[in-house]
Amino acid sequence: MDFHRYAVYFTPPEGDFAALGATWLGWDVARGCAVAHPEVSGLPAPLAELTATPRKYGLHATIKPPFALAEGQKEAGLIAAFERFCASEAAVTLEGLQIAGLGRFLALVPVGDQGALSALAARAVAAFEPWRAPLTEAQVARRRAGSLTPAQDALLLRWGYPYVMEEFRFHITLTGKRPKGELPGIKAALEGMMVPLLPRPYGVDALSLVGEDAAGRFHLIHRQTLTA
Protein backbone atom coordinates (compact mmCIF):
# COMPACT_ATOMS: atom_id res chain seq x y z
CA MET A 1 0.00 0.00 0.00
CA ASP A 2 1.22 3.49 -0.85
CA PHE A 3 1.19 5.92 2.09
CA HIS A 4 1.39 9.67 1.72
CA ARG A 5 2.20 10.38 5.38
CA TYR A 6 3.86 8.48 8.20
CA ALA A 7 3.90 8.80 11.99
CA VAL A 8 5.30 7.13 15.09
CA TYR A 9 2.59 6.09 17.53
CA PHE A 10 2.22 4.19 20.70
CA THR A 11 -0.41 1.53 20.04
CA PRO A 12 -1.39 -1.02 22.68
CA PRO A 13 -0.37 -4.65 22.21
CA GLU A 14 -2.84 -7.20 20.92
CA GLY A 15 -5.35 -8.05 23.61
CA ASP A 16 -8.66 -7.07 25.19
CA PHE A 17 -7.84 -3.37 25.57
CA ALA A 18 -6.68 -3.00 21.97
CA ALA A 19 -9.71 -4.93 20.71
CA LEU A 20 -12.16 -2.80 22.70
CA GLY A 21 -10.46 0.40 21.60
CA ALA A 22 -10.68 -0.63 17.96
CA THR A 23 -14.41 -1.36 18.19
CA TRP A 24 -15.05 1.81 20.21
CA LEU A 25 -13.45 3.93 17.49
CA GLY A 26 -14.59 1.76 14.58
CA TRP A 27 -11.11 1.34 13.04
CA ASP A 28 -8.47 -1.28 13.77
CA VAL A 29 -5.11 0.32 13.02
CA ALA A 30 -3.25 -2.99 13.50
CA ARG A 31 -5.34 -4.84 10.92
CA GLY A 32 -6.07 -1.79 8.79
CA CYS A 33 -9.81 -2.28 8.59
CA ALA A 34 -13.11 -0.91 9.82
CA VAL A 35 -14.80 -2.80 12.66
CA ALA A 36 -18.32 -2.68 14.03
CA HIS A 37 -19.05 -0.55 17.08
CA PRO A 38 -20.24 -2.26 20.27
CA GLU A 39 -23.70 -1.63 21.65
CA VAL A 40 -23.27 0.95 24.43
CA SER A 41 -26.26 2.26 26.35
CA GLY A 42 -26.59 5.71 27.86
CA LEU A 43 -24.54 7.65 25.31
CA PRO A 44 -25.73 11.15 24.30
CA ALA A 45 -25.26 10.42 20.58
CA PRO A 46 -24.48 7.42 18.35
CA LEU A 47 -21.01 6.05 18.95
CA ALA A 48 -20.15 6.53 15.28
CA GLU A 49 -20.80 10.26 15.73
CA LEU A 50 -18.85 10.53 19.00
CA THR A 51 -15.77 8.92 17.46
CA ALA A 52 -15.91 10.28 13.90
CA THR A 53 -12.87 12.55 14.26
CA PRO A 54 -10.36 10.15 15.90
CA ARG A 55 -11.57 7.06 13.99
CA LYS A 56 -9.14 7.27 11.09
CA TYR A 57 -6.12 7.31 13.42
CA GLY A 58 -7.09 4.22 15.41
CA LEU A 59 -6.38 3.68 19.11
CA HIS A 60 -3.07 5.42 19.65
CA ALA A 61 -0.99 8.11 21.27
CA THR A 62 1.06 10.26 18.90
CA ILE A 63 4.82 10.25 19.48
CA LYS A 64 6.13 11.70 16.19
CA PRO A 65 3.24 13.51 14.48
CA PRO A 66 2.28 12.64 10.89
CA PHE A 67 4.68 13.83 8.21
CA ALA A 68 5.28 13.43 4.49
CA LEU A 69 8.61 11.93 3.48
CA ALA A 70 11.32 14.41 2.58
CA GLU A 71 12.57 14.45 -0.98
CA GLY A 72 14.88 11.51 -1.62
CA GLN A 73 13.73 9.51 1.41
CA LYS A 74 12.10 6.11 1.03
CA GLU A 75 9.85 4.03 3.23
CA ALA A 76 12.46 1.29 3.53
CA GLY A 77 14.96 3.74 5.00
CA LEU A 78 12.38 5.05 7.43
CA ILE A 79 11.59 1.52 8.61
CA ALA A 80 15.27 0.81 9.16
CA ALA A 81 15.69 4.06 11.10
CA PHE A 82 12.61 3.22 13.17
CA GLU A 83 14.05 -0.19 14.08
CA ARG A 84 17.38 1.39 15.08
CA PHE A 85 15.63 3.99 17.21
CA CYS A 86 13.56 1.41 19.08
CA ALA A 87 16.64 -0.72 19.69
CA SER A 88 18.32 2.30 21.32
CA GLU A 89 15.44 3.19 23.66
CA ALA A 90 14.26 1.61 26.91
CA ALA A 91 10.68 0.87 27.88
CA VAL A 92 8.84 3.36 30.11
CA THR A 93 6.55 2.35 32.97
CA LEU A 94 3.64 4.57 33.97
CA GLU A 95 1.69 4.33 37.20
CA GLY A 96 -1.37 3.77 35.06
CA LEU A 97 -3.79 5.40 32.64
CA GLN A 98 -7.01 7.23 33.44
CA ILE A 99 -9.82 8.75 31.39
CA ALA A 100 -9.85 12.54 31.51
CA GLY A 101 -11.33 15.47 29.67
CA LEU A 102 -8.92 17.47 27.52
CA GLY A 103 -10.85 20.53 26.56
CA ARG A 104 -13.96 19.16 24.87
CA PHE A 105 -12.81 15.59 24.18
CA LEU A 106 -11.98 12.54 26.27
CA ALA A 107 -8.68 10.69 26.30
CA LEU A 108 -6.61 8.25 28.30
CA VAL A 109 -3.79 10.13 30.03
CA PRO A 110 -0.99 9.00 32.34
CA VAL A 111 -1.35 8.81 36.10
CA GLY A 112 1.61 10.33 37.97
CA ASP A 113 4.95 11.41 36.54
CA GLN A 114 5.39 11.18 32.78
CA GLY A 115 8.80 12.80 32.47
CA ALA A 116 10.49 9.71 31.05
CA LEU A 117 7.74 9.29 28.47
CA SER A 118 7.90 12.94 27.42
CA ALA A 119 11.67 12.62 27.05
CA LEU A 120 11.23 9.53 24.85
CA ALA A 121 8.76 11.42 22.66
CA ALA A 122 11.13 14.39 22.34
CA ARG A 123 13.96 12.10 21.21
CA ALA A 124 11.65 10.50 18.66
CA VAL A 125 10.58 13.87 17.25
CA ALA A 126 14.22 14.84 16.74
CA ALA A 127 15.38 11.43 15.49
CA PHE A 128 12.89 11.25 12.62
CA GLU A 129 13.23 14.87 11.57
CA PRO A 130 15.57 14.00 8.65
CA TRP A 131 12.70 12.02 7.10
CA ARG A 132 10.12 14.83 7.37
CA ALA A 133 9.32 17.02 4.40
CA PRO A 134 9.03 20.73 5.27
CA LEU A 135 5.52 22.08 5.71
CA THR A 136 4.08 24.09 2.88
CA GLU A 137 2.94 27.67 3.47
CA ALA A 138 -0.67 26.47 3.28
CA GLN A 139 -0.05 23.83 5.95
CA VAL A 140 1.54 26.39 8.26
CA ALA A 141 -1.37 28.78 7.73
CA ARG A 142 -3.88 26.02 8.46
CA ARG A 143 -2.17 25.22 11.76
CA ARG A 144 -1.91 28.88 12.71
CA ALA A 145 -5.65 29.22 12.29
CA GLY A 146 -5.91 27.31 15.58
CA SER A 147 -4.73 30.30 17.66
CA LEU A 148 -1.30 29.04 18.64
CA THR A 149 0.76 30.57 21.40
CA PRO A 150 4.14 32.06 20.42
CA ALA A 151 5.88 28.98 21.84
CA GLN A 152 3.62 26.64 19.87
CA ASP A 153 4.16 28.64 16.70
CA ALA A 154 7.92 28.33 17.14
CA LEU A 155 7.59 24.57 17.56
CA LEU A 156 5.44 24.40 14.43
CA LEU A 157 8.13 26.12 12.39
CA ARG A 158 10.97 24.04 13.88
CA TRP A 159 9.40 20.58 14.09
CA GLY A 160 6.33 20.73 11.85
CA TYR A 161 3.83 20.45 14.71
CA PRO A 162 2.97 22.76 17.61
CA TYR A 163 2.38 20.18 20.34
CA VAL A 164 5.77 18.53 20.69
CA MET A 165 8.74 18.90 23.05
CA GLU A 166 7.66 21.05 26.03
CA GLU A 167 4.08 21.19 24.67
CA PHE A 168 3.78 17.40 24.40
CA ARG A 169 1.07 15.66 26.43
CA PHE A 170 0.75 11.90 26.04
CA HIS A 171 -2.88 11.00 25.39
CA ILE A 172 -4.91 8.28 23.69
CA THR A 173 -7.88 10.05 22.13
CA LEU A 174 -11.27 8.41 22.65
CA THR A 175 -13.77 10.95 21.30
CA GLY A 176 -14.04 13.96 19.08
CA LYS A 177 -14.94 17.37 20.48
CA ARG A 178 -18.32 17.31 22.21
CA PRO A 179 -20.40 19.73 24.29
CA LYS A 180 -18.89 19.68 27.77
CA GLY A 181 -22.22 18.63 29.27
CA GLU A 182 -22.00 15.33 27.39
CA LEU A 183 -18.55 14.35 28.65
CA PRO A 184 -19.49 13.00 32.12
CA GLY A 185 -21.93 10.49 30.65
CA ILE A 186 -19.51 9.32 27.97
CA LYS A 187 -16.74 9.09 30.56
CA ALA A 188 -18.88 6.95 32.84
CA ALA A 189 -19.61 4.53 30.00
CA LEU A 190 -15.93 4.34 29.06
CA GLU A 191 -14.80 3.81 32.63
CA GLY A 192 -17.14 0.88 33.04
CA MET A 193 -15.91 -0.75 29.82
CA MET A 194 -12.28 0.21 29.47
CA VAL A 195 -10.69 0.89 32.86
CA PRO A 196 -10.98 -2.76 34.03
CA LEU A 197 -8.85 -3.77 31.03
CA LEU A 198 -5.98 -1.38 31.83
CA PRO A 199 -3.10 -2.87 33.83
CA ARG A 200 -1.50 -0.87 36.63
CA PRO A 201 1.32 -0.08 36.26
CA TYR A 202 1.06 0.44 32.51
CA GLY A 203 4.09 -0.27 30.35
CA VAL A 204 5.02 1.59 27.18
CA ASP A 205 7.40 -1.03 25.85
CA ALA A 206 7.01 -0.69 22.08
CA LEU A 207 6.38 1.92 19.41
CA SER A 208 4.51 1.64 16.11
CA LEU A 209 5.36 3.02 12.70
CA VAL A 210 2.13 3.78 10.85
CA GLY A 211 1.17 5.06 7.42
CA GLU A 212 -1.79 7.11 6.17
CA ASP A 213 -3.63 5.83 3.10
CA ALA A 214 -5.33 7.86 0.39
CA ALA A 215 -8.58 7.89 2.38
CA GLY A 216 -6.82 9.39 5.42
CA ARG A 217 -6.88 6.20 7.51
CA PHE A 218 -3.81 4.96 9.34
CA HIS A 219 -2.38 1.44 9.12
CA LEU A 220 0.25 -0.28 11.23
CA ILE A 221 3.44 -0.87 9.26
CA HIS A 222 5.66 -2.21 12.04
CA ARG A 223 5.44 -2.44 15.84
CA GLN A 224 8.89 -2.63 17.47
CA THR A 225 9.80 -3.41 21.07
CA LEU A 226 11.97 -0.89 22.95
CA THR A 227 14.98 -3.01 23.80
CA ALA A 228 17.78 -0.78 25.17
Image (cartoon, rainbow, N blue to C red):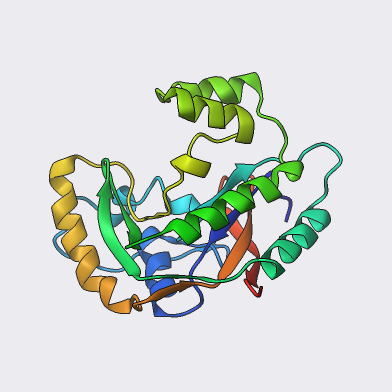
Residue at 70% over, 61% down: 85
Q: Quadrant of the C terminus?
A: bottom right
Instruction: Where is residue 224? Give x, y as percent.
Output: 65, 70
Q: Is residue 58 visible?
A: no
Q: Position of residue 41 (x, y in %)?
A: 16, 65
Would residue 59 appear left or right of 65 to someone viewing this image? left
Question: Total of numbered circles in the picture?
Answer: 0
Q: Is residue 187 left or right of residue 19?
A: left
Quadrant of residue 180 within the rendered picture: top left
Compared with 80, 179 (above or below) is above
Q: Position of residue 202 (x, y in %)?
A: 40, 73
Seen at 62% across and 31% down, the residue is: 158
Q: Is residue 210 above or below residue 49?
A: below
Residue, far right: 72
Q: Foreground: 85 or 183?
A: 85
Q: Nearer the viewer, residue 222 or 19?
A: 222
- Identified at 53% across, 54% down, the residue is 119
**x 35%, y 64%: residue:** 37
Direction from residue 107 to residue 218 in the image, left or right: right
Q: Quadrant of the N terminus?
A: bottom right
